[in-house]
Amino acid sequence: MSQTPISSSANSLSGPPRRLVIASRESRLAMWQAEYVRDCLKKLYPGCDVQILGMTTRGDQILDKALSKVGGKGLFVKELETALEDGRADLAVHSLKDVPMVMPNGFELACVMAREDARDAFVSNDFDSLEALPKGSVVGTSSLRRESVLRAKFPHLEILPLRGNLDTRMVKLDRGEYQAIILAAAGLKRLGLESRIRALLPIDPHTPAAGQGALGIETLSKHPSIKEWLAPLNDLPTLYAVTAERMVSRQLGGSCEVPLAAYATWNQDQMSIRSFVASVDGKANCLASAQGFVGSLAEAEALGLSVAQDLIAQGAASLLPNGLPSSF
């Protein structure tokens, strides 16, 4: 049966939505996230028919190459954006860390939901921590950010690429291809796999990626009513924090090709933010942090910008494969 999103139906803009279609990747974690958003919307708008349009993205199809070599994390969102553009869906649910720092014209990040645990998780069947791994142990990760920290702190370990959705990565671990893998704690917790976590890695030095642990909802700018309907799902502390993080990443051209971390917390108008840029081998890095009053999105962006400028003053541009973005 065909699905008719609100953008092409007869919903009243002054009342609650009657029908919404969510675009989502079809991985188990992505579908959990889409179903979570669906349930939140159904609670807000009991009369709304909320459907999920499952899709396979290029990022899901290309599993034999590192993301940094085939187009970056934008590969996970392009097909979903196409579904928004051609009217098959009204909103797309993403892991925010997968959303490019600069949104395409006509699209916007309409909602940021409450963050799950943003830390990285150490997962192993035989060892309790990174420190316990013997020399030569194989550790899998999909992230240059994680790789750079591991190579700096644990040069005796072998770091190998790890692609695929969360379940695929766990299967590779269980087959013995890796002695340990590093994953985002949020995904494991959302899928009820918290028992597989042997250790949560400390923010210092394992600083998360910008937006890690948060869900972002993307819409078309030309449909402001959808953004209004999503507004109750916004979480202010998360929104302020990820706004600062994404500003740092945007100024430094954050992508899968850059070992870049940015993590902020916001509470009672006070924000703390920590960020680093590093070489993939972990031998060089620039680290910056800041604290201050933040009472608006503009002030969150300003604090993020100050951290980016600090990193650049330290020479971060020399660690970026393509230098600073031309817009800086």
Image (cartoon, rainbow, N blue to C red):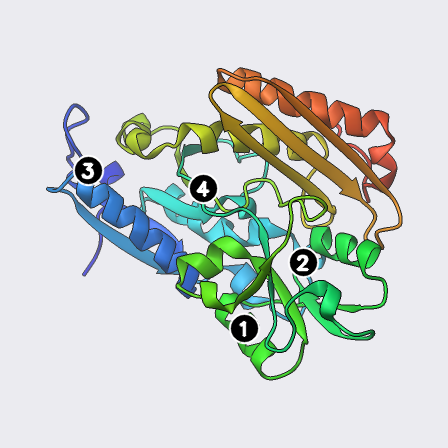
Rendered view: 271 above or below 246: above
Position of residue 149 measured from the top left corner of the image (x, y, whole percent): 76, 52
Among numbered discs 3 and 2, the one appearing first in the sequence: 3
Position of residue 110 measured from the top left corner of the image (x, y, whole percent): 40, 32
Position of residue 106 measured from the top left corner of the image (x, y, whole percent): 45, 31
Closer-to-camera residue (16/197): 197
Q: Is residue 153 left or right of residue 271?
A: right
Q: Quadrant of residue 326?
A: top right
Q: CA distance from mark 3 to mark 4?
A: 19 Å
- The mark closer to the camera, 1 or 2, is 1
- The mark closer to the camera, 3 or 4, is 4
- Mark 2, secondary structure of its residue: helix
* Three-letter amino acid code at the position of disc 4: Arg
Q: Which residue is mark 2?
A: 70
Among numbered discs 1 and 4, the one appearing first in the sequence: 4
Q: In the image as oriented, which residue stretches furthest toward the left?
A: 47
Q: Could one spot residue 75 in this view of the protein?
A: yes
Among numbered discs 1 and 2, the one appearing first in the sequence: 2
Among numbered discs 3 and 4, the one appearing first in the sequence: 3
Q: Which residue is mark 3?
A: 44
> Which of the labelled discs sits on residue 170, or is there none?
1
Residue name at image x 32 percent, y 26 percent: 224
Closer-to-camera residue (90/158): 158
Q: Is residue 298 left or right of residue 283?
A: left
Q: Specify few, some or many for label 1: CA neighbours under 10 Å numbering under 14, 14-19, or 20 or more.
A: some
* Three-letter amino acid code at the position of disc 3: Leu
Q: Which residue is mark 4?
A: 115
Q: Specify few, some or many for label 4: CA neighbours under 10 Å numbering under 14, 14-19, or 20 or more.
A: many
